[in-house]
Image (cartoon, rainbow, N blue to C red):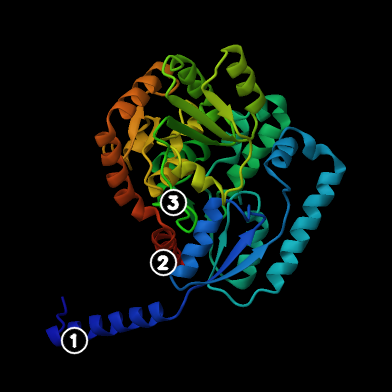
């Protein structure tokens, strides 16, 4: 076997390092593509994170969905209306025109939700001779299942399944936030592990950060939930826990938000004659951090659905970033990232009594709350915008 002089080997690696440094000096140019939710935290964090890390990001976006309620309506069978087909054609024509105006780029990244956008995205990225990645995040078919939409419209369920299955085979790389979601996709759609890269959920630390000047009241122990009242959150468990805690007049529950199960949850609270729970309705996200800062304890998720166990939800990271203790349902996915009584307080899911016991312990133990706040805040630094953007940029750079 031929042997190379040591000096030649050193020169080779020196040249290689210089070439890598040269590549790093040139910013990666990314086409952020799709009908993605422009104001969704995942997309906002990824866009800002990439830019904070020096990437050039061209947004190639067209509006297809008007709101969450609109998506639910169409997935429930509303898509059969001819007007919706016209809307789809118009959105993708606008997306095609927007892409034609983008400057040369190194890679296309399809934003969430983009499982349907990848069909056009694949054609356009091939046309430019560039790779394409998809930030999958959540399964559209799983969401439809858990919201009862596939049962309401079986044809819609089958259509979403086959479109998602075909769409996930098109990108060069699939981005997910947890190993649990990778397992779900590989088993359900017969995909390979090596197709996936991990980028955890991030937290928008421009909005969610410690509010040192705002403190909870001394007269009440305030417990806050905010969200969209969907099955995976397990809001029923929270309501039953509130009912069990009515003998302690110092504990107050505050619910913020709107969504699919709000009417059902309000009816449940009324049937239980709950007096320690207030529904505040929707609050603008710019005002929400103040409400969190005024609370002693943040509620995470307690549902038992597959989706609830596949990810560590945004509200958990947001509570940690705001230096508030968080109590949430136990799951393998969460234990892979956070430790019970070190970063968060974990309880059995769908078990109001377990939630009650956890709230009582945290209320009676301010030292434990302080420990959760300190450790949780240190842990969540890895999920800040800049850190998440760096992880995404590294994966995209490797692919490009």
Q: Position of residue 74 (x, y in %)?
A: 75, 38
Q: Position of residue 191 (x, y in %)?
A: 48, 45
Q: Nearer the viewer, residue 248 or 127?
A: 248
Taking the image as shown, residue 255 lies to the left or right of residue 388, namely right
Q: Which of marks 3 and 1 precedes in the sequence?
A: 1
Count of marks placed on residues: 3
Q: Position of residue 337 (x, y in %)?
A: 33, 43
Q: Toward which corner of the image does residue 130 lie, by quadrant?
A: bottom right
Secondary element at tag 3: strand
Residue density around tag 1, few if under 14, some if 14–19, many if 20 or more, within 10 Å: few
The residue pinned by badge 2 equals 398
Q: Residue at x 54, y 51 (%)?
A: 41
Would residue 313 be visible to someone looking at this image?
Answer: no
Q: Pointers 2 and 1 in contact (CB under 8 A)?
A: no
Q: Nearer the viewer, residue 353 or 58?
A: 353
Q: Residue at x 80, y 57 (%)?
A: 90
Where is 242 relative to 64, above or below?
above
Residue found at the very far right of the displayed protein? 82
Residue density around tag 2, few if under 14, some if 14–19, many if 20 or more, within 10 Å: few
Q: Nearer the viewer, residue 379 or 122?
A: 379
Q: Which of marks 1 and 2 precedes in the sequence?
A: 1
Secondary element at tag 1: helix
Taking the image as shown, residue 53 lies to the left or right of residue 282, namely left
Marks 2 and 3, how far apart in space? Answer: 13 Å
Q: Residue at x 27, y 45 (%)?
A: 375
Secondary element at tag 2: helix
Residue density around tag 3, few if under 14, some if 14–19, many if 20 or more, within 10 Å: many
Q: Toward which corner of the image does residue 288 lie, by quadrant?
A: top right
Marks 2 and 1, how far apart in space? Answer: 27 Å
The residue pinned by badge 3 equals 196
Where is 278 relative to 21, above or below?
above
The residue pinned by badge 1 equals 8
């Amino acid at each position: 076997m031929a042997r190379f002089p040591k000096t030649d080997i050193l020169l080779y690696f020196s040249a290689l390092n210089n070439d890598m440094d040269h590549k790093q000096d040139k910013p990666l140019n990314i086409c952020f593509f799709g009908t993605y939710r422009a104001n969704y935290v995942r997309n906002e964090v990824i866009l800002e994170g990439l830019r904070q890390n020096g990437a050039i990001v061209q947004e190639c976006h067209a509006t297809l969905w008007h709101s969450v309620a609109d998506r639910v309506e169409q997935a429930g069978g509303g898509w059969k209306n001819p007007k919706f087909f016209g809307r789809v054609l118009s959105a993708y024509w606008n997306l095609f025109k927007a892409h034609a105006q983008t400057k040369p780029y190194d890679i296309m990244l399809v934003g969430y939700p983009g499982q349907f956008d990848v069909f056009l995205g694949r054609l356009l990225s091939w046309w430019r001779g560039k790779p394409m990645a998809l930030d999958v995040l959540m399964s559209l078919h799983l969401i439809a299942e858990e919201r009862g939409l596939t049962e309401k419209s079986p044809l819609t369920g089958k259509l979403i399944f086959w479109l998602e299955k075909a769409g996930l085979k098109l990108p060069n790389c699939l981005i997910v936030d947890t190993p649990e979601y990778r397992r779900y996709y590989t088993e359900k759609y017969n995909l390979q592990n090596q197709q996936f890269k991990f980028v955890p959920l991030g937290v928008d630390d421009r909005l969610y950060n410690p509010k040192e000047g705002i403190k909870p009241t001394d007269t009440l122990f305030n417990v806050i939930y905010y969200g969209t009242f969907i099955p995976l959150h397990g809001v029923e468990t929270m309501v039953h826990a509130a009912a069990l805690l009515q003998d302690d007049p110092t504990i107050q529950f505050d619910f913020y938000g709107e969504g699919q199960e709000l009417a059902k949850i309000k009816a449940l609270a009324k049937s239980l004659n709950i007096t320690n729970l207030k529904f505040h309705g929707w609050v603008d996200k710019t005002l929400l951090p103040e409400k969190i800062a005024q609370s002693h304890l943040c509620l995470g998720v307690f549902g038992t659905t597959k989706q609830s166990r596949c990810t560590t939800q945004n509200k958990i990271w947001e509570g940690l970033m705001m230096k508030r203790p968080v109590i949430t349902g136990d799951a393998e996915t969460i234990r892979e990232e956070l430790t019970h009584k070190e970063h968060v307080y974990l309880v059995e899911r769908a078990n109001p009594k377990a939630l009650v016991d956890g709230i009582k312990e945290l209320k009676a133990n301010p030292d434990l709350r302080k420990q959760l706040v300190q450790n949780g805040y240190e842990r969540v630094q890895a999920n800040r915008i800049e850190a998440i953007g760096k992880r995404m940029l590294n994966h995209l750079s490797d692919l490009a």
